[in-house]
Amino acid sequence: PEPPAPSPAGRPGLRSHLGLPRCQMFEPVSCTYTYLLGDRESREAVLIDPVLETAPRDAQLVKELGLRLLYAVNTHCHADHVTGSGLLRSLLPGCQSVISRLSGAQADLHIEDGDSIRFGRFVSWVLGPQEEGDCTKQQGCCAKTLYHSVHEKIFTLPGDCLVYPAHDYRGFTVSTVEEERTLNPRLTLSCEEFVKLMDNLNLPKPQQIDFAVPANMRCGVQTPTS
Ligand SMILES: N[C@@H](CCC(=O)N[C@@H](CCS)C(=O)NCC(=O)O)C(=O)O
Ligand SMILES: [Fe+2]
């Protein structure tokens, strides 16, 4: 039988996306965006970068849309918020936590460069030579690797491919590969200039880093099975 149609009540943004249920959600303290992607036919879904405080909201949305969450994926071992992936495993049985093996963090599933995550008819995830996703110097990310990874993996995608941020502190919600390739003030630099700039950002320490990183090494709130 056909699974129940998602309830559109109060969610006009989702009603227009029933072909592929997808949703960009926001956590205002860390300015983190969490993304829900789902397959309308199989009802299988993935959640990218859930935050602990908003995990109950995300779980509720998954249920309302009649989706089955297969994976709660962390793009990296975040320093600025505690992940919601551990809590989501409890709230939505069958959901597995996922992170890059190179992060060293615990998870149900570790992924590496070239691995795919499948949900319904869709396949997602591109990883660089090291951990990619949303990554900064504050977590030991190598700027040179980041530069080459973005140029060789992201910038070889079609120009009109949409690019969604992991964070945005100025209110932007989406751009395109072409826009980033031609207008991003850092990514239009040479590799040498980019590395120099990133090595001299001197960002203040993220407020949650001292408890967020140790917690995120364990999926946020609980120890997963593997
Ligand atoms: N005030 C926030 C700052 C968190 C922070 O450092 N964010 C990074 C990205 C984290 S994945 C960032 O802002 N990078 C900016 C850049 O120019 O690269 C806090 O205390 O959490
Ligand atoms: Fe972050």
Image (cartoon, rainbow, N blue to C red):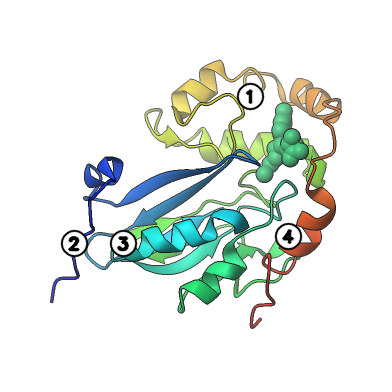
Proximity of marks 1 and 2: CB atoms separated by less than 8 Å: no
- Which residue shows up at 66% across the image and 36% down it? 148
- Picture quadrant of residue 178: top left
Tell me the residue at 58%/24% (across/down): 170
The image position of residue 113, as x and y in percent, is 60, 57
Q: Nearer the viewer, mark 2 or mark 4?
A: 2
- In percent of the image, x 80 and y 62: which residue is there? 214
**Gap in Å between the C-alphas at discs 2 and 4?**
38 Å
Q: Is residue 110 above or below residue 81?
A: below
Disc with the residue nearer the chain's start (2 vs 4): 2
Residue 220 in picture, x, y percent from top left: 68, 64
Quarter of the image that includes the N terminus: bottom left
Distance of label 2 from label 3 (alpha carbons) = 9 Å
Marks 3 and 4 in Cβ contact (< 8 Å): no
Q: Position of residue 118 (x, y in %)?
A: 40, 65
Q: Which residue is mark 1?
A: 187
| Distance between mark 4 and mark 1 Cα atoms | 24 Å
Camera-near label (1 vs 2) is 2
What amino acid does circle 2 point to? Answer: Ala
The residue under label 2 is: 5
Direction from residue 149 to residue 13 in the image, left or right = left
In this picture, residue 124 sits left or right of residue 135: left
Question: Dot 4: within a 10 Å radius of its alpha carbon, few (fewer than 14), some, or many (20 or more) residues?
Answer: some
Residue 103, numbered label: 4
Asked if residue 110 shows in the view, the reply is: no
**Of the image marks 3 and 4, the number of the one nearer the N terminus:** 3
Classify the position of ligand 2 by quadrant: top left, top right, bottom left or bottom right. Answer: top right
